[in-house]
Image: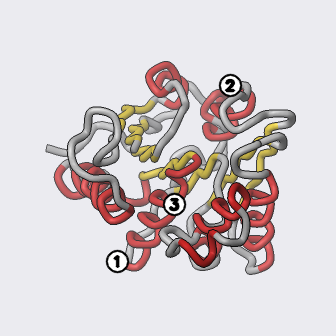
Amino acid sequence: MRARSHVLHVLCHALTPARSEAAHWRALVVLVEYPGYGLSPGRASSAGIDRHVRAAYNHFTVTLGVPASRVVLFGCSVGTGPAAALAGAVQAAGAKVGALVLQSPYTSVRDAAAHIVGNVAYFLMAERWDNAARLRGLTCPVLVVHGTSDEVIPFSHGAALAALRQQVGLPISLHAQEGASHNVFRTKEDLSVPIACVPLGGCLAGACMYASADAPGCACAVLAA
C-alpha cells in the first residue's frame, strides 16, 4: 500500500508544534524518539539515533513507497547531525531527498561542545556528527534557520554552514531568526513559513505552501525524530 502523501518531512529533535503546522504544510507528522530518551527504551548513542532515524525513513520510503525526492529532512539542534547524516546516506545509496532543513545547527558536535567547555572538548570527545563536512557534498536544497541570539549553539555555526555551501556552489538558504534564542523564537514567521517555502522536491515548483493551499498534488508527510 503506497502512502497517500507526496512529501515526507523527517524531523530530528524538532521543537516545532508539529501537529498544528501539519495543516499548513499539508503534512503527515511522524515523531521518532531517540533510544534512551523520553519513554523510548535502550541506551542513548549516536549509532542508535542514526539507526532509529534511518528505520523511520525506510518505513515510509520502502514499506509505504514514498519516493526519496519527496522526503524533507528537518533537524533541530542535536537532531541536525542525524538529519544531515541520513541525507548523506540516502545520497550515497544513489537517491536524493527533496530538501534538508537545519534549525540551530552546529558545524560539528565537537565545535558545539567547545563553545561550552572550551578547546578541551577536542581532546576529550570523538566526533559524532560533522555537519560541515557533510554539507560540502550534499546536492539537495538546504535551508538553515538560526537565532541570532542563540546562547547554546551560536549563530556563527549556521552562518558558517551557509557560507561553505555557497563557496562550493550548492543550493542553500539562510533564515536568520532576529533576536531569537535557542528555544525562544516566533514559530510561524521564523520557522513555519521559511520551511513551507522550501521547494520540496519540486512538489511546489518553488512556491510557498502558505500561498499554495490549492496547488494540486502537494500533500506532505512529516517524520520527526
Residue 113 image-quadrant placement: bottom right
Q: Earlier in the sequence, mark 1 or mark 2?
A: 1
Q: Earlier in the sequence, mark 3 or mark 1?
A: 3
- Please tell me whether mark 1 sits on a helix, a strand or a loop: loop
Q: Position of residue 57 (x, y in %)?
A: 31, 54
Q: CA distance from mark 3 to mark 1?
A: 18 Å
Disc 1 + disc 2, Cβ < 8 Å: no
User: Going by the image, does 156 lie left or right of 183?
Assistant: right
Q: Which residue is mark 3?
A: 81
Q: Which residue is mark 1?
A: 93
Camera sees residue 7: no
Q: Position of residue 62 (x, y in %)?
A: 21, 58
Looking at this view, is 47 or 89 the one in front?
47
Q: Which residue is mark 2?
A: 188
Residue 178 image-quadrant placement: top right
Amino acid bearing label 3: Gly
Q: Position of residue 40 (x, y in %)?
A: 25, 39
Residue farthest to the left?
1
Amino acid bearing label 2: Lys
Q: Position of residue 7 (x, y in %)?
A: 42, 45
